[in-house]
Amino acid sequence: METFLLENDREIYTVAFFGTIAIVAFWEGVLPRRQSTQPLRTRWFSNSAIALANLGAISLVFPIAALAFSIIIAEHGIGLFQMLDVPTWLAILLGILSIDCGRWLHHYLMHRVPFLWRLHRVHHADHDYDFTVGLRFHPFEGLFTTGFVFPIILLLGPPPVAVLVAEFLVGVSGIIVHANGRIAYWLDRYVRLIFVTPDMHRVHHSIVRGEHDSNYAAVFSFWDRLFGTYVAAPAAGHTGMTIGLPELRDSRCLKLGWMLLSPFQPMPKSLPKDPIKPN
Ligand SMILES: [Zn+2]
């Protein structure tokens, strides 16, 4: 099983990624959680275009690079797990959890360090919430995201299959948690005890600072409860809340050119002249 996964990593990742997109798009079409406030065509075109840059350069290549790195580390017997002779099953479990915990820290830093926030706010500047927001990342953020995994692999030396599963989970979860799909309250309550759900992550895209500086977890939801950054629901409710950032209500934020260039332009000092009305 392990050999099969490692030999077909790229194919498995690609099928899972695009398969999840198809299922989530169907879910959003049949059971939408919120009404769109902006033209779908503009947003989907821009978000898909920036995703293409990411998919080609980063999302499909770099996870494989992390996996290749973990194979080299394993072959040389480097890392805490190998030094301590941790049983394989435990090393896989701890490896997956450690990488996901590292992603919580990475996301926290993206919000706290000013030059990282300039990259990450591209993701937060969309004015609606659907699976395409999960594709809307500046390519330079993608480099930092994947680079963050390498020191964890070097330090712990997790089995390569743990790296593969962790990358697979975060790729699929990135689409699911941004879904504009309705889920029964009781089901959401149970699922979010372990996994991040769309209703949990949507809070993170609220225009309210105290809400968008919360719920940083990528796959496993318990990191936010553990580190005191968990917010259960937006104060205005899921249908009443406004998505986006208060200083970026301009319709240019939905365009590809802005997404690519904005990290290198001055931060907006005041609200633009043609702000979009809060939804
Ligand atoms: Zn964020």
Image (tube, rainbow, N blue to C red):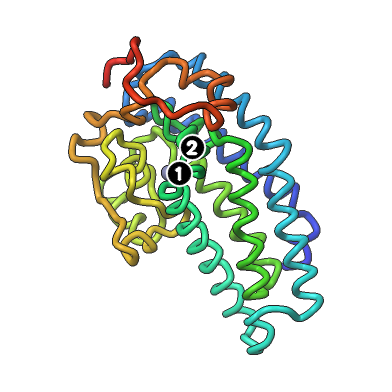
Q: Residues within 10 Å of mark 2 (few under 14, many from 20)?
A: many
Q: Amino acid at mark 2?
A: Arg
- Element assignment for label 2: helix
Residue at left 48%, top 20%? 254
Q: Quadrant of residue 69?
A: bottom right
Residue 158 in percent (x, y) is at 65, 73
Quadrant the C terminus occupies? top left
Quadrant the N terminus occupies? bottom right
Quadrant of the displayed image that contains ligand 1: top left
Residue 90, numbered label: none
Residue marked by disc 2 = 118
Residue 86 in percent (x, y) is at 62, 86
Image-based side of 82 in relation to 180, left or right: right
Q: Is ligand 1 less than 8 Å from the beta carbon at label 2?
A: no
Residue 72 in percent (x, y) is at 80, 69
Q: Which residue is farthest left? A: 235
Residue at left 70%, top 58%? 66
Q: Residues within 10 Å of mark 1 (few under 14, many from 20)?
A: few
Residue 33 in percent (x, y) is at 33, 31
Q: Amino acid at mark 1?
A: Pro
Q: Is residue 254 above or below residue 224?
A: above
Q: Is residue 189 above or below residue 154?
A: above
Q: Is residue 224 above or below residue 186?
A: below
Q: Which residue is farthest bottom? A: 84
Q: Is ligand 1 less than 8 Å from the beta carbon at label 1?
A: no
146, 134: nearer the viewer: 146
Q: Quadrant of residue 220?
A: bottom left
Residue marked by disc 1 = 114
- Element assignment for label 1: helix
Tag 2 and tag 1, C-beta contact below 8 Å: yes
Whole-number angstrom distance, CA of label 2 to CA of label 1: 6 Å
Residue at left 57%, top 19%? 45
